[in-house]
Amino acid sequence: VYRGSVKDFPGFDASQDAEALYNAMKGFGSDKEAILDLITSRSNKQRVEICQAYKSLYGKDLIADLKYELTGKFERLIVSLMRPPAYSDAKEIKDAIAGIGTDEKCLIEILASRTNQEIHNLAAAYKDAYERDLETDIVGDTSGHFKKMLVVLLQGTREDDDVVSEDLVEQDAKDLLEAGELKWGTDEAQFIYILGRRSKQHLRLVFDEYLKISGKPIERSIRGELSGDFEKLMLAVVKCIRSTAEYFAERLYKAMKGLGTRDNTLIRIMVSRSEIDMLDIREVFRTKYEKSLYNMIKEDTSGEYKKALLKLCGGDDDAAGEFFPEAAQVAYRMWELSAVAKVELRGTVQPVGGFNDDGDAQVLRKAMKGLGTDEGAIIEVVTQRSNAQRQQILKAYKAHYGRDLMADLKSELSGSLAKLILGLMLTPAQYDAKQLRKAVEGAGTDESVLIEIMATRNNREIAAINEAYQEAYHKRLEDDLSSDTSGHLKRILVSLALGNRDEGPENLTQAHEDAKKLADVSSNDSSDSLETRFLSILCTRSYPHLRRVFQEFIKMTNHDVEHAIRKRMSGDVRDAFLAIVRSVKNKPAFFADKLYKSMKGAGTDERTLTRIMISRSEIDLLNIRGEFVDLFDKSLHHMIEKDTSGDYRKALLALCGGED
C-alpha cells in the first residue's frame, strides 16, 4: 500500500510543464505561486523528466534557473524536490561534512533511517555527483565508536525482515545486557554489531526480550551506557527500528516546537518522506502530540514556503473521525509492553543501617537548640532515614526530652523546607490525609490534588488514609469528599475512597464485555451515561484486567482509550479518568509528567513538587527518575537543581538521590 502524500500527476506532460515553468520565470520577477503549485503536485520521477524536457526545449538547466529566481528556505525546498531522492541525500550529507564542523544530527538522521537499497543508491549518487567516495569522506570527518557505527550502516547490509530465529533473539538480548548493564565499562562493539546488522523484525523482538529480562527499555540502557554522538546515533537506530514513522514524527515536532524553526530538518524530512511514509508520520504525529502535523506547520511557517510544505504534508488530520491504523498499533503495543514488563518498583530512600533513634534525636535537638538552626543537620537525618525510622525518632525524642519533635521543627523551620521536612515526619497515610484535607478545606477545592491522590493509591493505601483521616479530623474522608465536590467527579472520588478495587488477574471474556461498554458511544440510553459506564469499570476493575480492557478497546475502535476520554469528556471528570488510565499504563511515568509540569516554564509549583517527592520517595521514585529521563531527555536531579534553591533544594536533591 502506498503511504506517501505525493502521487504521480495524471495526464502528465513533461514538455508542457517545462514550458509553464519557463513562462513563470520569464521577465521581471517570477510567479512563485505557479512554480510551487506545479512542482508539489508532480512526483519525483515526473520532476526529473521535467528537468530533461526543460534542457531540450531551452538549452538551460532548470535547477540553476530556479536557484537564480528563488531565495531562502523556499528555494532550498523547491530545489530539493527537483533532485532524485538519492541525490538529495547525497547533497545533505555533503553539506553536513563540508566546511568547518560537522552536522552530526543530519548524518544520524539519514544513515539511521534509510533502507539497504536507499543506502546503496545514496553511495552511488554521491560518487556520481562529487566524484568522491562517501565512506572515505565520512570516516575522515568523524571518530570513535560513532564513526564505526556509521561505517556499519553505510554498508547497507542489514538482514532482511524474514530472518528471525527464537534462540538468537534471546541470545542477542542477553549479549546486549551483558555488554552494558552487567559489565564494568561497556562493550560498544556488541551494540554496534547487533544493532547494525540484525533485521528490524528480529530487533523488535530482541527489544521486547530485553525489557523482560532487564526490566527497562533498551533506550534507557543506551542512555546510561553510551554518550555523545554515538549515544544519539544508537537511540536514532533503535527508534527507527521500532517505528520509522514515529522517529520522523518526533524529529518534525522537535524541529518546530519552542522558539525558532529548524528549517533544514523540516525541509529534509518533508521532501524525503513525501513519497514514502508521510501518511504514517501524520498519523503518529496526531496521536503523539494531539495536534496535526498540518496545523503545526501552518502555525510555524509563512508565505510560499508554508504553502509548499502544506502541499507536501497532504492533508489535515484534525478533521473529525480520522482513522489511525498505524497509531492504533503503536498504542496497542504500549499496552502489551505495559502488561509484560516486570518492573521492580524502587524508592530512593532506604532504611539506614546501624540505626540509633536516640542518637538521631540528640542530633536533631542539638541542631535546634540555642540561637540559629542547623538546617543541614536536620536535612541529613530526616532525608536519609526511612519513614518507619522517622516514627521511632519521634518517640525517642519525646522519651529523651519530653518535647514534641514536630512542634520544635515547626518553630525552627519555615517556608518550603518546613513543609518538606514536616511532611517527611508524618506517616504516608497521615501525609496523604493532610493533603486531602487541605484540598477540601477553605473556600475553593483543589480538585487536581484529590484526583492525583485518589486515582493512584492502592486498596491498602486507601484504607490507611481513611483511618488517618478519621483520626486527625474526626470526620469520614468520604463525607468530606461528598460535601466538597459534585456531579460525576464526586461519584468517582467516593467510589475510589472505598478502596475496594478488584485485585484479581484479567478475565478475557469480561474484558471484551467491558471494552464494548466503554466503546459503545452510540447507545443513547440516557439512564446509563458515558461517565457512569467509565466509572463502573475504571474505578472497580483490577489493573491487569484494565490493561486487557484497554487493548480490546483499541481493537474495537482504532483509538487509545485516552483519546476517547479526551474527545468525549471535559474538566475534572476527564482528568480523573485520565489519571486512572495513566496509572494503569505506567504510574511512574504519570508522576514524572506531573513533576516536569511543576517545574517547566516560569515559576515552580512547589506544592506539587514537594507532595510527589515525599509520597513517592519510598515507593517508586527511582522508577520515576528513569521515566523522567526517557520522557524529557533531562534528569530530574538536574531540573530540581536549576529550579529550586537553598536548603529546600538541598533536601529535595537528597530525596531524589543520584544524577541520571
Image (cartoon, rainbow, N blue to C red):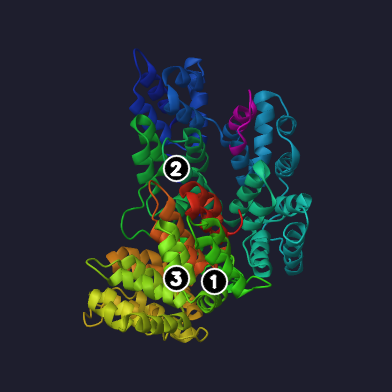
Residue 347, visible in the rendered structure: no
- Which of marks 3 and 2 precedes in the sequence? 2
Q: Amino acid at mark 1?
A: Ile
**Residue 519, relative to residue 109: is it above or below?**
below
Task: Assess whether residue 5 is covered by the magenta stretch.
Answer: no
Using the rendered view, name the quadrant where residue 122 is placed. top right
**CB within 8 Å, label 1 to label 2:** no
**CB within 8 Å, label 2 to label 3:** no
Q: Amino acid at mark 3?
A: Met
**Residue 221, relative to residue 268: is it above or below?**
below
Q: Is residue 614 left or right of residue 471?
A: right
Q: Residue at x 57, y 36 (%)?
A: 85
Task: Assess whether residue 104 is covered by the magenta stretch.
Answer: yes
Residue 566, visible in the rendered structure: yes
Q: Amino acid at mark 2?
A: Val
- Which of marks 3 and 1 precedes in the sequence? 3
- In front: label 2 or label 3: 3
Q: Which mark is residue 6?
A: 2
Q: Which residue is mark 3?
A: 406
Q: Nearer the viewer, residue 651 or 660?
A: 651
Image quarter where the C terminus lies is bottom right
Distance (Cα) linking label 2 and label 3: 69 Å
Q: Which residue is mark 1?
A: 619
